């Protein structure tokens, strides 16, 4: 369903479970960034009414996810701490050349967002199915569904604003790039690390 070309090893889930404070901190900041991205799309493409409505929903939902992760952290005696560097999204954003064409820039941005959501969905599935902690397993299984919905929404909008053949070619190339990038990941307790 997700179209990802590289599967996360279950060994990543073990690394993440052994470093819960780290994975939860990284996840909390990832949710903040997802909310901020949706708000930025609203700001930059405010004339697109349907997009604005859906990005508003995503921004609120992602911030709610942040709150849920943070509450889990507090319950377990963890402190959010400072954001740590994660180059996954930045690497994806650099895949497409910079453009001054607003429509192309939007399509590229939507595709990157779709891929981030797809990978998050896949990681949450691997995490939920390979951990001993029942509370967190259920939590990540529930979040997995939300990430899948966001993935399809972003990809759907990309296909709405540009011809399907062009979008699908961009998507295919981005997926291949991401798969190569993911081959060297899976060793850190971060959502995309």
Image: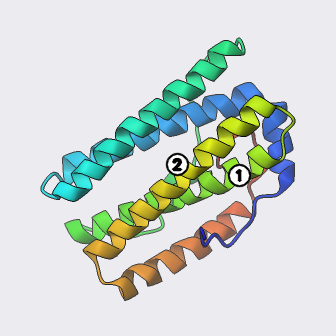
Q: Residue at x 24, y 48 (%)?
A: 42
Asked if residue 22 lies left or right of residue 38, the reply is right
Q: Residue at x 53, y 79 (%)?
A: 172
Q: Quadrant of residue 164?
A: bottom left
Asked if residue 102 lies left or right of residue 9, the reply is left
Q: Which residue is mark 1?
A: 125
For the residue carrying disc 2, how many other residues have a C-alpha within 10 Å: few (<14), some (14-19), or many (20+)? some
Q: Which residue is more in the foreground, 176 or 2?
A: 2
Q: Residue at x 57, y 51 (%)?
A: 145
In percent of width and height, residue 189 lies at: 74, 39
Quick one: which residue is furthest to the bottom in this view? 165
Q: Which residue is more in the foreground, 145 or 186?
A: 145
Q: For mark 2, give the secondary structure.
A: helix
Q: Which residue is more in the foreground, 176 or 49?
A: 49
Q: Which part of the image, by quadrant, shows the N terminus? A: bottom right
In percent of width and height, residue 148 lies at: 54, 57
Task: Judge whether residue 91 can be spotted in this image.
Answer: no
Q: For mark 1, give the secondary structure.
A: helix
Q: Quadrant of residue 26?
A: top right
Count of marks placed on residues: 2
In the image, residue 9 sits, relative to residue 56, either above or below, namely below
Numbered circle sitting on residue 11: none
In the image, residue 9 sits, relative to residue 31, either above or below, namely below
Nearer-N-terminus badge (1/2):
1
Task: Judge whether residue 76 can be spotted in this image.
Answer: yes
For the residue carrying disc 1, how many other residues have a C-alpha within 10 Å: few (<14), some (14-19), or many (20+)? many
Asked if residue 144 lies left or right of residue 110, the reply is right
Numbered circle sitting on residue 146: 2
């Amino acid at each position: 369903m997700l179209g990802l070309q590289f599967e996360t090893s279950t060994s990543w889930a073990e690394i993440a479970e052994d470093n819960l404070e780290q994975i939860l901190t990284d996840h909390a900041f990832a949710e903040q960034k997802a909310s901020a991205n949706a708000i930025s799309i609203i700001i930059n493409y405010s004339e697109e009414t349907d997009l604005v409505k859906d990005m508003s929903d995503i921004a609120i939902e992602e911030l709610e996810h942040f709150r849920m992760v943070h509450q889990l952290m507090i319950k377990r005696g963890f402190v959010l701490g400072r954001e740590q560097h994660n180059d996954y999204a930045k690497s994806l954003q650099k895949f497409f050349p910079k453009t001054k064409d607003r429509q192309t820039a939007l399509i590229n941005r939507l595709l990157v967002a779709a891929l981030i959501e797809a990978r998050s969905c896949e990681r949450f599935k691997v995490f939920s199915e390979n951990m001993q902690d029942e509370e967190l397993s259920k939590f990540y299984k529930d979040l997995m569904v939300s990430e899948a919905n966001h993935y399809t929404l972003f990809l759907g909008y990309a296909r709405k604003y540009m011809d399907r053949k062009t979008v699908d070619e961009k998507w295919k190339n981005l997926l291949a790039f991401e798969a190569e990038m993911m081959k060297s990941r899976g060793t850190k307790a971060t959502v995309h690390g």
